[in-house]
Amino acid sequence: MKTILLILLTATVGLAQKTEGIVTYQRTSYWIKIINRLPFLSREEKDRAAQTWKNEDGEGQKEKMKLLFNEKGSLYTHEDQQGQSDDGRWSWQKDDFYISRNFEKETQTDIIETLGKTYIIDDSLHTPVWKVMNQIKDVNGYVCMKAETTDPIRGQKIAAWFSQDIPVPAGPERYFGLPGLIMELDINDGDVIIEAIKVEFKPVANEIVLPKTKGKKIKDKEYDTLLSKHISDSIKANRNPYWSVRY
């Protein structure tokens, strides 16, 4: 009887641990593919981009991100706020990028530095409209189901692979709201891939805290309008809008 109780207790503890922890993601952007997809850019600019990014063609530009999560909320940001060149000779402070979700209070607060300003997007939760598909695959040892949605502002198709083994509705970037943690995000048919490469279960409640930052407070709709105008203006001027805003 004691053995059975011990097994049940161990299983319960193990399950509880799977609702709190840190996920490390590898965010890979394939810039040659992204630029070639933009019909309003000149062939000259596309050729110049191909030359600039030729050493990363096939491998993409990589950056590590992290997601702290529990049943009450999540915080997604850079793994390291300090950027550094491959040879280590120079470094820089990365733009503010903190994506916070409070599932308990159904609120969101995002701190995003873009277009020369820092914006604090404070609003109620606006869950993406997902369509769950009947496809599954393995992502870093977790069986995941596929769900799809769209980004109407950027005109992107979004595919998310989520694991019900981690039953929290959190995810990378500004995506969430599925019955399991999003382990992989595919933006626009492989233009950007954000894949979980490490999952560590541990208490993180004290770490899911936004930094004190000054910025312009706006709502979701205002932020969407800001991005839409920038993208529209860039298209008219035959410029790549994604040098200034996150793809």
Image (spheres, rainbow, N blue to C red):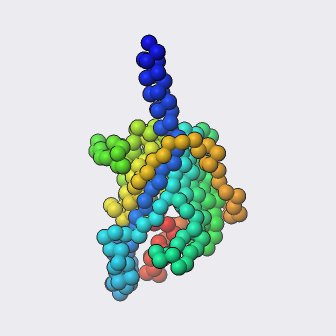
Which quadrant of the figure contains the C terminus?
bottom left
Question: In the image, what residue occupies the spot 58% across and 58% down?
Answer: 98
In front: 97, or 41? 97
Residue 142, horizontal then vertical, whole percent? 36, 43
Q: Is residue 195 positioned above or below 4 on the image?
A: below
Question: In the image, what residue occupies the spot 51% across and 69% down?
Answer: 245
Visible residue check, residue 46: no
Residue 94, by quadrant, is bottom right
Question: In the image, what residue occupies the spot 68% across and 64% down?
Answer: 215
Residue 32, by quadrant, is bottom left
In front: 163, or 178? 163
Residue 115, horizontal then vertical, whole percent? 58, 72
Residue at the farthest top position: 1
Q: Is residue 135 positioned above or below 185 on the image?
A: above
Question: In the image, what residue occupies the spot 44% across and 39% down?
Answer: 166
Visible residue check, residue 118: yes
Q: Is residue 235 positioned above or below 224 on the image?
A: below
